[in-house]
Image (spheres, rainbow, N blue to C red):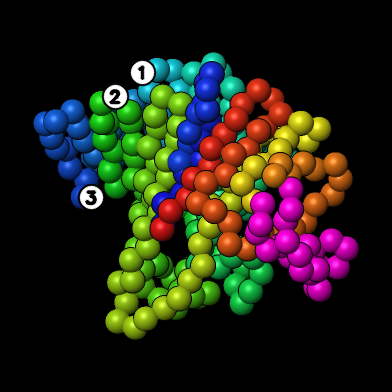
Amino acid sequence: MAASCASTLPSLPFVSSSNSHRRFRRSGVVAMASVGQKVYAPGVAVSEGNGGLPKIDLKSPQGSEAEIYLFGACVTSFKVPNGNDLLFVRPDAVFNGQKPISGGIPHCFPQFGPGPMQQHGFARNVNWSITDSEVTEGDPAVTLELKDDSYSRSMWDFSFQALYKVSLHSTSLSTTLKITNTDDKPFSFNSALHTYFRASITGVSVKGLKGCKTLNKDPDPKNPLEGIEEREEITFPGFVDCIYLGAPSELILDSGLGDKIAISNSK
């Protein structure tokens, strides 16, 4: 599944959503990945983040930046060239390697919401590894990997490989999540990239959901009210807890802070 989210400046910015060896490709693509030797492609670096947790820093020649923590493979920042960070991390977020990071773009896998295992599954609560980094026409990208282990199998007894690629562009960020069944039996799963956008609640709005079926969980989360969205532009004058079914592949989010963000998703 590929997820993307975008920001445009001054028009509409767009954010979408190997083996450890060095290699060179022509046609404008250079890829270097040597995790043991700590050699990465230009624009890709690893540093110490909050709580001493390792994080990946991506920087484009145009001035955009992103950071990704290996714990949970969580993107915690995406800054466009004017310095605006389009993502939000909660002030009370914990960076201790024990609890999921609250904010940015956390993973939900192999379960979304409550269920037989921990909330939203385990992928946001474990360390991922770097398997590849590359730069294409100046745009850096990194690929992270998660495989099953005794911890994941204690909740979900399957063998799998998850590859998560994050690519930084001048005014956009694209993310691609690929799940491969490496077991000898089939499995089903749910996944989501649970993005937190920075916004002003008095000015934020969303376009593109008109005509969608809605499940309004306020006032009774256990018995949501069914309806149809009739508004062209959705605003948030009060508390909202609503699910939109059959949402289109692209939405427009006005953050109320000067950024209009195109959010695109494909499978």
Q: Position of residue 4 (x, y in %)?
A: 47, 44
- What span is in magenta? 210-231
| Image x and y of residue 9, in percent | 52, 21
**Residue 145 located within the stretch drawn in magenta:** no
Relative depth, front residue between 20 and 76: 76
> The disc labelled 3 sits on which kind of residue?
Ser
User: Relative to 177, is 154 on the left or the right?
Assistant: right
Instruction: Please identify the quadrant where the N terminus is shown.
Output: bottom left
230 in the magenta segment: yes
- Regarding residue 173, the answer to whether it shows in the image is yes
Determine which residue is flagged by label 1. Answer: 61
Sequence-first tag of 1 and 2: 1
Closer to the camera in the image, 136 or 74: 136
Residue 98 locus on image (x, y percent): 60, 53
- Between 99 and 82, the one lying in front of the other is 82
Note whether 223 is above or below 255 in the view shown. below
- Identity of the amino acid at label 1? Pro
Q: Quadrant of residue 28?
A: top left
Pointer 3 residue: 18
